[in-house]
Amino acid sequence: MSYLQCCGALHQRHADSGELGAADASMLMRSRYSAYVLDRLDYLLATWHASTRPAHLGPNEPGLKWLGLEVKAHHVQDADHATVEFVARSKFGGRAHRLHEISRFVREDSVWYYLAGEMR
């Protein structure tokens, strides 16, 4: 699936109308990864649950290159709670980095939000 078919449509809808609309936690995870790659800080903050959202986010460090996302698992606990395990790879300062996290998501008023993550 291309960026425009997946995450780009979600990013554009948010930019145009402020609406959020990922179909499930896995799709939200993918759109958030793409937002990190593109420095879409507005989208990241909007999709972060208000109870755990930071006051602000800074842009990517100059020279940081995101290399890819692998979603390892998507578990639905019930209609409004899910987890997504992923590995995001990046390169910075000539060194490869790997971020392995199990993220928790909650759905409120039909909208999925990132709640918190546990590093692996």
Image: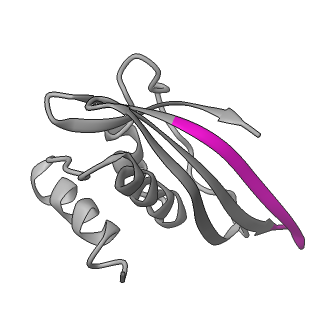
Relative to 63, does residue 30 appear above or below in the rendering?
A: above
Relative to 47, does residue 67 appear above or below in the rendering?
A: below
Residue at the left extreme, as displayed: 17
Q: Which residues are magenta?
A: 92-103
Which residue is found at the position 56% from the left and 44% from the top? 58
Q: Main secondary structure of the magenta part?
A: strand
Give 57 or 85, whichever is nearer the viewer: 85
The image quarter containing residue 70 is: bottom right
**Number of numbered markers:** 0
Residue 113: percent from the left, percent from the top?
Answer: 34, 35
Relative to 12, does residue 42 appear above or below in the rendering?
A: above
In the rendered image, which quarter contains the C terminus? Answer: top right
Residue 65: percent from the left, percent from the top?
Answer: 68, 71
The image quarter containing residue 35 is: bottom left
Which residue is found at the position 44% from the left and 60% from the top? 30
In the rendered image, which quarter contains the N terminus? Answer: bottom left
Does residue 13 appear left or right of residue 55 in this picture? left
Residue at the top extreme, as displayed: 51
The image quarter containing residue 63 is: bottom right
Residue 98: percent from the left, percent from the top?
Answer: 78, 58
Does residue 66 appear left or right of residue 112 in this picture? right
Does residue 65 appear left or right of residue 37 in this picture? right
Give 108 or 20, whichever is nearer the viewer: 108
Residue 87: percent from the left, percent from the top?
Answer: 67, 57
The colour scheme used to paint the residues is one colour
Which residue is found at the position 48% from the left and 59% from the top? 39
Q: Is residue 104 magenta?
A: no
Give 23 or 78, whichever is nearer the viewer: 78
